[in-house]
Amino acid sequence: MGLDAVRWGILSTANIGRKKVIPALLKARRTEVAAIASRDADVAASVAAELGIPRSFGSYEELLSDPDIDAVYIPLPNHLHPEWTISAAAAGKHVLCEKPLAMTSAAAAQMVEACQGAGVILMEAFMYRLHPSWLAVRDVVRSGRIGELKSVQSWFSYYNDDPANIRNIREVGGGALYDIGCYCVSLSRLLFEGEPRNVKATVVRDPEMGVDTLTSAILEFDDGVATFTCSTRTETDQRVHIYGTRGRVSVGIPFNIPPDRPTEIYVTSGGSPPVAPATETITFDAADPYTVQAEAFASVILDGARPAFSADDAVANLKVIEQIFAVGESR
């Protein structure tokens, strides 16, 4: 390619891009934020000026036609992911798309096929799993330090009952499972390194908005069980506990990892539990997970590095989400 840096275009002025991803991209090595697009040219220009982005466009099509853009980041609502990922692929742009990749596994598979056919990289933006703390978690589990992995328990929640908020609009992919439960599914598959052979679930929906507000699932793997609850109507919290035959791991801040403070994981193995377990606290220097993600993406594009996770993983994650909805609402 002969590039020194990946030149990014941002499709949409969504808050996650403005507040988290674009600032992280601006800090990343071998990364340049070249342009941003909105369906409102004035909004695009305002955000570009706010964040120091050189160019702005009043339509997504204009940005995709810019030959000086190598890759696009898509933080659009979930139901728009397929359309604009496929359009970006047709324009020859690499794609980093927010999670979940689509609202169905079939749509996600079409996105993967389009990107493969166009010879561009497609990555789902699950930033947490590239962070040093999660790399360490995987190493601890794989090393056998806690014995054989048997159980993963996770919780992810916040409170939002605003009917105008996109996370409370069912038609565009709102609801707890799509928004945050997808993390719990992802980490369960990540740690067990496989797919669940059986799924049990319960899904509670808001009677007026229609989105799921409290979803719990049991995912049965060949070697153990993952359980989780996600909610958009409870106190804000997140946690992950991982249990093996000889120990356990707890993750301090598993998902919304802060970019500006150290983070910890806690590894317990031995001692005299539950009163006096032998617990080691492993601390990691501050690292913005979105910056880590951007630099990993740049390495794939510029160096030909193998992606840590294939786009097919996003399809597999959605297949589990579909099972959870189907089972949880079949009663």
Image (cartoon, rainbow, N blue to C red):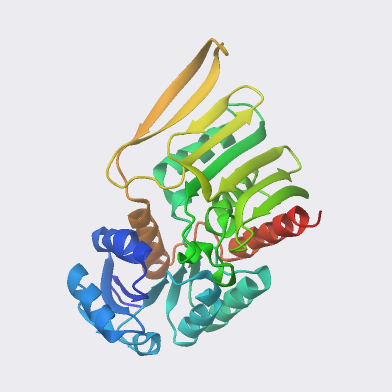
- The mark total stands at 0
The answer to whether one can see residue 29 in this image is no
What residue sits 46% from the left and 67% below the top? 164
Residue found 56% across the figure and 66% down from its top: 311
Which quarter of the image is occupied by the N terminus? bottom left
**Closer to the camera in the image, 304 or 89:** 89
Residue at 49 percent of width and 55 percent of height = 161
Viewer-side residue, 123 vs 10: 10
Residue 147 in percent (x, y) is at: 63, 26
Where residue 212 sits in the image (x, y, percent)? 62, 57
Image quadrant where residue 253 sits: top left
Relative to 31, is 283 above or below?
A: above
Percent of width and height locating residue 26: 25, 63
Does the rendering let one see residue 259?
yes
Judging depth in this view, the residue of 92 and 323 nearest the camera is 323
Q: Furthest-right residue in view?
A: 331
Q: Residue 315's image quarter?
A: bottom right
Percent position (x, y) of residue 17?
35, 65
Relative to 315, is 262 above or below?
Answer: above
Q: In this view, does 117 lie above or below 328?
A: below
What residue is shown at x 67% (from left), y 24% (from top)? 245
- 174 lies left or right of 94: right
